[in-house]
Every structure is written in structure tokens, then in C-alpha cells.
């Protein structure tokens, strides 16, 4: 990752539990990168994710799987800051750290699924997120950007004037826009993969073979 502050192209940020990373995550990153002309996408595994039950695999295993899945792609990097930190992995803290590292003028673009975006008012210091980064929201399968109509009154009030359908807006400012983009629907989830593995069913073609090899090598997600 470039550590020098400066006015480089937009940097996409994809946070997640990645328990394990799968092809839904990788397509989300790839389609955001292309649709929004992101210079890079940085994957950020959560160490201790708030708002959910504890992950099944350790932060170190989840980080290793993200590294394996993204290795060799020149447009992808991995940030281990949340895994290395103590305490809950709050996105606002990560964005503050990355804003400091990349300087005030580089566009930062937080990539989210529509469901994650609609729940954002439950996040720690959520209103500050819009000052630190743009937010790119993947449209839902057949409903396009209908999720915009599902915003709570509170979220609507905070975001109504920020929605911009032109990806070029990302390069014009370092933060502040909400950009919907189209994504190929892939009904893959980490929970589904964990369930397959727990029951001894195949997960092949839902995640990279290299990640599946790692899971088997380390006996992850087996019933205790
Ligand atoms: P779990 O099933 O354990 O809840 P998950 O598969 O949803 O996990 P996360 O690590 O929680 O994965 O998700 C990280 C980000 O990736 C979120 O913004 C989520 O909306 C998005 N995401 C996860 N799966 C998909 C998918 N199949 N298509 C598009 N986005 C996805």
C-alpha cells in the first residue's frame, strides 16, 4: 500500500469478517473497482467485529485467508490494522487511521452491500463516516437502487443530498458522496460456507480453491 500522503486515485476499502472470504466478497471488490475506477481495493478483516456473534475462525486465520485469496492481484491490498488492534473493530476508527495515512485529499471509498448501508445508523459515530470517506453501495439483485427508498428518516436526512449516480464524483472530492453501483448478484455468504463445512458438504466453487485448501489444512469450521 502506498504510505505517502498525496493526491492519488480513489482507494476502495472493503471491510468484513471474512469468516471465510468467498467469491461474493471478491466479485464485490472487482466490480466496485471497475465500475468506480478505483486505483486499488484494500481488504480490511475485522479483528473483533461489533454487532455480531464472535467469528468461528481466529483473526489470524481470517487474515491469512484474505491474503491468500487476494495474492497476485495487483489492484488488491490487505490492511491488518483491525486484526492488530485491541478492542472492537469500529469502522470510524479505521477510516480515521487510513485518512491520516493517505492524507486529506486522496478519495477513500468505503464499499458496502445495500443491507450493510441501511444498518449504518447503528454503527459507532456513524454520522462522521461521511466526512471521512465516500460510500459505494452495491445495488440489490433485481431491485436496482430501490434500497434508497428504504432508508430510515434519520438516514435519509443525513444522506439525501449526498447520493450521486456519477462515479466521477469520487475523484472530485476526498469524501462525502454516496454512489450506488451495479453488482452481479451472487447468493454466497460465509455462513452458508461454514454450514456446508460443518456438515461435511462441498463448498467448492463458492470460494477460491486456495482458501479451501487452507481451511482443510488447518481443520477450520469443523464441528467441535
Ligand atoms: P456472514 O454470512 O458470516 O454474515 P458475509 O458473507 O455476509 O458473512 P461479511 O464478511 O460479513 O460476509 O461481509 C463483508 C461485506 O461483504 C459486507 O459489506 C457484505 O454486504 C458484503 N458481502 C458479503 N457477501 C456478499 C455477496 N455474496 N455479494 C455482495 N456483497 C457481499
Image (spheres, grey):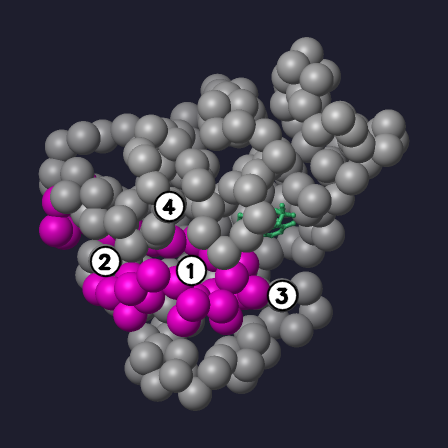
Please rate how many residues cluster around mark 1, counting C-alpha atoms within 10 Å: few if below 14, some from 14 to 19, many from 20. many
Viewer-nearest of labels 4 and 3?
Answer: 4
Residue 147 in view of the camera:
yes
Of residues 192 and 173, the one drawn nearer to the viewer in this rendering? 192
State the SS at label 2.
Answer: helix
Residue at (49, 80) in percent of width and height = 151
Q: Give the quadrant of the C terminus.
A: top right
Give the image location of residue 113, x and y in percent: 54, 59
Q: Distance between the residues labelled 4 and 3?
A: 29 Å
The label shown at residue 140 is 3
Q: Give the quadrant of the N terminus.
A: top left
The residue pinned by badge 2 equals 132
The residue pinned by badge 1 equals 136
Please rate how many residues cluster around mark 2, counting C-alpha atoms within 10 Å: few if below 14, some from 14 to 19, many from 20. many
First reached walking from the N terminus: tag 1 or tag 4: 4
Residue at (29, 54) in percent of width and height = 92
Amino acid at each position: 500500500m502506498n504510505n505517502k500522503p498525496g493526491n492519488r486515485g480513489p482507494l476502495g476499502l472493503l471491510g468484513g469478517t471474512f469468516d471465510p472470504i468467498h467469491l461474493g466478497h471478491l466479485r464485490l471488490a472487482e466490480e466496485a473497482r471497475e465500475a468506480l475506477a478505483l486505483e486499488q481495493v484494500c481488504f480490511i478483516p475485522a479483528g473483533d467485529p461489533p454487532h455480531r456473534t464472535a467469528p468461528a475462525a481466529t483473526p489470524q486465520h481470517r487474515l491469512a485467508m484474505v491474503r491468500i485469496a487476494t495474492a497476485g492481484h495487483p489492484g488488491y491490498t490487505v490492511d491488518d490494522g483491525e486484526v492488530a488492534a485491541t478492542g472492537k473493530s469500529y469502522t470510524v476508527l479505521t477510516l480515521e487511521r487510513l485518512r491520516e495515512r493517505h492524507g486529506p485529499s486522496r478519495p477513500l471509498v468505503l464499499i458496502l452491500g445495500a443491507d450493510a448501508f441501511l444498518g449504518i445508523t447503528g454503527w459507532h459515530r456513524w454520522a462522521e463516516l461521511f466526512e471521512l470517506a465516500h460510500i459505494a453501495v452495491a445495488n440489490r439483485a433485481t431491485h436496482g437502487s430501490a434500497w434508497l427508498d428504504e432508508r430510515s428518516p434519520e438516514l435519509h436526512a443525513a444522506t439525501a443530498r449526498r447520493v450521486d449516480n456519477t462515479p466521477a464524483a469520487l475523484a472530485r472530492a476526498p469524501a462525502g458522496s454516496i454512489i450506488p453501483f451495479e453488482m452481479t448478484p451472487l447468493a454466497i455468504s460465509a455462513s452458508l460456507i461454514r454450514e456446508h463445512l460443518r456438515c461435511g458438504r462441498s463448498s467448492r466453487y463458492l470460494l477460491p480453491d486456495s482458501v479451501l485448501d487452507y481451511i482443510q489444512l488447518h481443520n477450520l469450521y469443523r464441528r467441535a
